[in-house]
Image (tube, rainbow, N blue to C red):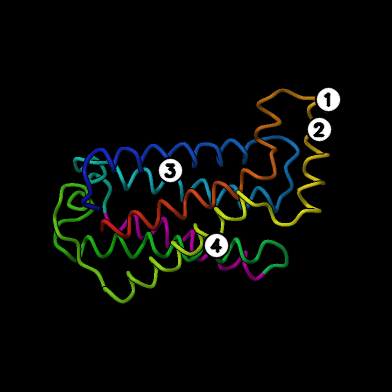
Amino acid sequence: MHGSAMVDWLLAGLTGVTGLYCLARLLRPGAARAERRLDASEAVKGLGMAAMALPYGLSGGVPVWLWAALFGTAAVWSLGEGLRPGHRGHHLYHAVGHLAMVYMAVAAASGGHGMAGMSDGADAAGIPLLTGALLLFFGGYALVGGVRLIGGANPAAGAGAGAAGAAIGTAAPGSVVRRLLGAPELPNACRTVLGIGMFTMLLIM
């Protein structure tokens, strides 16, 4: 990326906090295996995005082949998970995200300056048509996800969520942290945040 240092720090902080939250969800007790798989994928993506977005070339110490190996492996894993029943759409979305991370790393390397140049203002290489398609994909996903978070899926679901929230507030056991980690809305919020982050990284690449 070659945005301003402030934009880079904000992007790194936002995606880093999101990745840490997903990592905390991964470690919470009692989580279903399917949820843990999604949390693991989101944690890798969020923390990787944060590291890649660091300004002043701080990410330049990581070899490009390591970025490609990490996110390439994550993409293959997500594609495999997408073949299983349940959460297929989410896993396929993450597969596209991991592949986009590989694309950005390779594009930076092909420009002759590596990941450090993406934060220092050098012109990154890339395929304009592919970059544009990824911008449309992640921008559209973030827009749809934001609308769903604001408006809710449907009135019945909203009523059910409200009743559940009231029950949690009055009688559910557990600490506030445990309830926060188990909140059903936050994984969707995390995916929306990471979608915005991907859009931003591609836009200033």
* Residue at (56, 68) in percent of width and height: 79
**Closer to the observer: label 4 or label 3?**
3
Q: Which amino acid does label 2 sit on?
A: Ala
Question: What amino acid type is highlighted by mark number 1?
Answer: Thr
What whole-number distance in Å separates the C-alpha atoms at marks 1 and 3? Answer: 33 Å
Amino acid under label 3?
Answer: Thr
Q: CB atoms at circles 4 and 1 under 8 Å apart? A: no
Q: What stretch is highlighted in magenta?
A: 64-83
What residue is pinned by disc 3? 15
Query: Considering only order in the chain, which callout, 2 or 4, is on the residue closer to the N terminus?
Result: 4
C-alpha gap between disc 4 and disc 3: 21 Å
Of pointers 1 and 3, the one earlier in the residue sequence: 3
Residue sticking out furthest to the top: 175
The residue where tag 4 is placed is 77
In the image, residue 48 sits, relative to residue 107, either above or below, namely above
Q: Do the numbered discs 1 and 2 sit on residues whose CB atoms are within 8 Å?
A: yes
Q: Measuring 81% from the left and 39% from the top, which residue is drawn there?
A: 164
Relative to 171, say whether 192 is above or below: below
Q: How crowded is mark 4: few (under 14 residues within 10 Å), some or many (20 or more)?
A: some
Q: Residue 117 vs residue 25: left or right?
A: left
